[in-house]
Amino acid sequence: MLPWASLLVLALISGKFATTPKPVISLNPPWIPAIEGETVLLTCNGFDLHSPRRITWYHGNTNWTTTENTLKVHTAGEYRCQIQDSASSYPVHLQFSSAPLTLQAPVSVFQDDSVVLKCRAKENVVLNSLKIYKNTKILTVLNNSPEFHIHQASLKDNGEYFCKGDKESNKFVSSNSVKIEVEELFPLPVLTARPSQPTEGTLVTLTCEVQLPPQRLDIQLQFRFFRGRQALGSGWSHSPEFRIFNMRQTGSYSCNAKAVTLNRWKQSHEVQIRVQSEC
Ligand SMILES: *[C@@H]1O[C@H](CO)[C@@H](O)[C@H](O)[C@H]1NC(C)=O
């Protein structure tokens, strides 16, 4: 039984490596569109931490290879990166606004994020009473600060935002509009059992799989496992695997996955595991 068990573990490990995630480009400052004349620092965040690293950057039709995972840019276009021989990242479409008034927003917004929108007037443009609109209704008047904060973003914050300022009597300036779509932090976890039809008294490995969004692979997760309503083991653990060395009980098994810092958790569907008696 032992060699077989270690084979299983090996299979699981190689399964993990087979799905090496794409790198993700982050922006600093993290808002789009950027403002003409300013510089944006792109960082290619990957998961292959072996050095020396070879990073390939793509901008439009050009590409170049370096050891730097950051890139300072001030021209518009589509940017992608690649670490060693990884798949290339999702593209980032960068625009530099030269409009009198620009509303800036983060590239993506997830549930519970604390979000900042910035309504920025061009240097020589003087505007009074800047207002933020959501779906054509006034949301707020900005006082002394170009920033509007959304605390703990949720689906109710979805919508089209723009800002507007008064120039002089009866004249006003409107910004671009920005569509906010709050994304779920993670979908329901999925429980799998290996083997799915175990023989009585053998090893069963339960795995609680969670598909995190690529921008959020840094989220720390914890897991716990259940037979019916009874918790297995000693509660939350950092391992997405739970081993039952001496499987005895047919029943409904499920798992929970929790985003540690956000204290938000989700429950998988139940999986019926039928234990075959030894012949
Ligand atoms: C990268 O650039 C070279 C020319 O410098 C070109 O031949 C090659 O096709 C480019 N690769 C990709 C993937 O765009």
Image: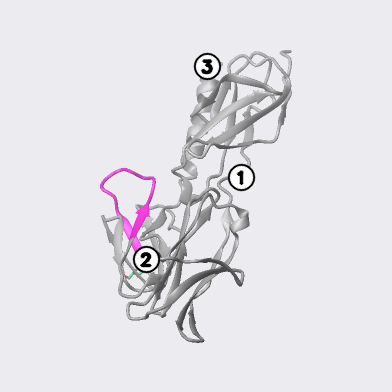
Between tags 3 and 2, which lies in front?
2
Left or right for 200, reference 139: right
What segment carries the magenta color? 42-57
Instruction: Name the residue type under label 3.
Output: Leu
Q: Nearer the viewer, residue 219 or 127?
A: 127
The Cα atoms of the two marked residues, 1 and 2, are separated by 31 Å
Residue 199 on image: x %, y %:
68, 18
Can you say which quadrant of the picture contains the C terminus?
top right
Q: Which mark is residue 2?
A: 3
First reached walking from the N terminus: tag 1 or tag 3: 3
Q: Nearer the viewer, mark 1 or mark 3?
A: 1
Residue receiving disc 2: 58
- Secondary structure category for the residue under label 2: strand
Residue denoted by label 1: 187
- In this view, the residue in front, 175 or 27, is 175
Is residue 52 magenta-colored?
yes
